[in-house]
Image: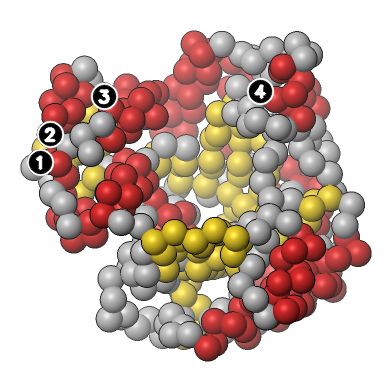
Amino acid sequence: MIPHFPLTEPSDPPWIHPRAAYVHIPFCAHQCGYCDFAIATGKDDRIHAYLDALALEMSSWKQRPIPSPLATLFVGGGTPSHLNLGQLAILCDLLHHALPVQSGAEVSIEANPESLSAEKVKLLAEAGWSRISLGAQSFSKRTLKNLDRPHDPDAVRNAVALVKAANLDVSLDLIFGAPAQTSPDWQADLVEAIALGTDHISTYGLTYEKGTPLEKRVRLGMVRPIGEELERTMYSMAMESLGGAGYEHYEISNFAKPNKRCRHNEIYWANEAHLGFGMGAAGFVGLTRNLNTRDLERYIRQCFEGSNPAFQSETLGPRERVIETMIQNLRRAGGIESNRFFKQTGFEPNAFFKPELNPLAEQGFLAVDEQGFRLSYEGKFVADTVMKRLIRCL
């Protein structure tokens, strides 16, 4: 059982004092064509060693000022549900001792439909988890095949039913803009996700990350990306369909039923402090960002040697804090809140970004008022461009 502790108010603000932790489980049955995450395939024999290494990395925090019990805990991957029942039980026990959470905390884990069983869901529910995020991606057999996903649509439906039967919140990840995907395909995905009674839906436009199998197929002419206009249409369809079904569009790619937002990701988008454990995990504590090695054997070895598995560390200066906070905050429906932004960065945003605010507002990409500014409906389609123009003010 994951222990719960009363809420306590930290003495430091949340952008200094971490109230969230991310734990990375890199193991997967295979690599999907679009994936560029820190994963490990064909290395299941190293799972137990990895969990031991993870325990050692977490125990090193006991020598430091440890945060008060966490408000959110998120286990991602990779495919955490790829662990067998015994390994998953070990992970639950490890987190129970290493990362206590507050009463009412959001405790989430990612899962793939084909590797989530009734026994695993029962174990997670009994251990105190509150939310399972399913990598569905699509309900179309053709789209799933083009994305190299190993499951079929029925596996998604069965997994959702298992999670809901255990009274856990269920989130679905969906991808639009896949090769050969059509508007009717995407509309059918949205309709089915809504019909299943999903609490939270993330809609991600497919990106062809350099070095991934899918990107290589594009370079070889084996795959043709869909056009920008069709991708825009699909994003608009998501906003209209999910909004009409009562989902709140609270972040560029994320929609939630009332009171079902992902609180863990909201901490990221507020650019607040968070702990990160595991291969490839990122932590942000005391304005210093650390990134762990993406090499499985190096991660295990360094943890067993008692050395820090981080291969990159950067303490953000004033300019970097402003840029990161602006980019993350602007992803949210609420956008930039002037008072909070000033407390967090030391800069008044409406004055700081003034050279671009009025032009962007006149072009219909931003809504600006005394409280701050946020992306308009049209601005959501060109968010990256808006952010680049704001960065020019620095």
Residue shown at the point (64%, 68%) measured from the top left: 309
C-alpha span from label 3 to label 4? 27 Å
- CA gap, disc 3 and disc 1: 18 Å
Q: Which residue in the protein does label 4 denote? A: 178
Circle nearer the N terminus (1, 4): 4
Q: Residue at x 26, y 24 (%)?
A: 365
Residue at 59% in and 28% down? 207
Q: Which mark is residue 354?
A: 2
| Residue closest to the eye, 262 or 344 | 344
In what element is the residue under mark 4?
loop
User: Which one is closest to the eye, mark 1 or mark 4?
Assistant: 1
Q: Amino acid at mark 3?
A: Phe
Q: Secondary structure at mark 1?
A: helix
**Residue type at the position of mark 2:** Lys
Tell me if residue 123 comes above or below residue 314 in the rendering.
below
The answer to whether residue 6 of the structure is visible from this angle is: yes
Q: Quadrant of residue 74?
A: bottom right
Residue 128, above or below 263 = below
Residue at the spot 39% in from the left edge and 23% down from the top edge = 381
For the rendered model, the colour scheme is: secondary structure
